[in-house]
Image (tube, grey):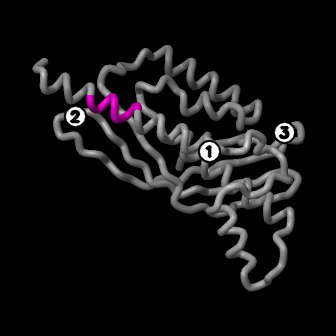
């Protein structure tokens, strides 16, 4: 391999690591550690704007059910982004870092999935990754006590180290189901469409 190709690969790996680090800090930094209670306040400006916009005409204080619904939608969107953003070199960190938000059922699935993928011993010498951004959501169902299901529309960008280095952008939907498990809100099911 000539020096230029080696330099290019090293540069791409460094850029990917920086992007992953930025995503990690952007998604985890100053997030509430307990997103599981319905009484958590809406913590981000975007969420506050959603709540305020919904109530501009009414001039009424936001009720607890509306806060819970917005919080669950925010959890679903963030989960979809983090779950769908990965590379073949990150050793399944995107899934492992989400396990605190998963129900026991989904945690079991994720452990089995990771073990199965690791057993395949895929080639990680050539970078391949996907970044995912939630662009909109739709509430499929919602129950204050039982949970909710959201359909998240995402934009995904697939990148690989190839001779052309052309990224592929596509749109994909994902369904996220959130349930109350032992008094806490947990993501119970994830399905790409």
For marks 3 and 1, give the one nearer the viewer: 1
What residue does disc 2 label?
Answer: 162
**Looking at the image, which residue is at 45% across and 36% down?**
20
Along the line of sight, the residue nearer the viewer: 45 or 122: 45
Residue 185 appears at what percent x and percent y? Answer: 79, 44
Image quadrant in which the N terminus is located? top left
- Badge 3 density bin: few <14, some 14–19, many ≥20, Cα 10 Å: some
Q: Is residue 103 left or right of residue 74?
A: right
Residue shown at 84%/47% (left/top)? Answer: 37
Q: Earlier in the sequence, mark 3 or mark 2?
A: 2
By secondary structure, the bulk of the magenta-drawn segment is best described as helix
In the image, the segment drawn in magenta is 11-17
Find disc 3 in the rendering and name its residue.
181
Left or right of 183 in this view: 72 = left
Say whether residue 117 is left or right of residue 143.
Answer: left
Q: Which residue position is annotated with label 1?
A: 79
In the image, what residue occupies the spot 80% across and 82% down? 59
């Amino acid at each position: 391999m000539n020096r230029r190709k080696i330099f290019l690969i090293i540069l791409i790996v460094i850029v990917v690591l920086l992007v992953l680090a930025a995503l990690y800090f952007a998604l985890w930094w100053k997030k509430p550690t307990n997103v599981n209670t319905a009484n958590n306040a809406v913590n981000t400006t975007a969420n506050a704007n959603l709540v305020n916009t919904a109530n501009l005409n009414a001039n009424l204080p936001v009720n607890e059910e509306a806060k819970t619904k917005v919080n669950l939608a925010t959890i679903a969107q963030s989960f979809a982004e983090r779950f769908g953003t990965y590379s073949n070199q990150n050793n399944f960190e995107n899934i492992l870092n989400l396990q605190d938000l998963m129900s026991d059922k989904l945690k079991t699935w994720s452990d089995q999935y990771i073990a199965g993928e690791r057993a395949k011993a895929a080639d990680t010498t050539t970078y391949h990754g996907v970044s995912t951004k939630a662009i909109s959501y739709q509430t499929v169902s919602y129950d204050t006590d039982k949970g909710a299901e959201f359909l998240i529309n995402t934009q995904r960008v697939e990148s690989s180290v190839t001779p052309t280095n052309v990224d592929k952008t596509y749109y994909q939907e994902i369904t996220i189901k959130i349930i109350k498990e032992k008094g806490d809100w947990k993501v119970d099911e994830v399905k790409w469409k």
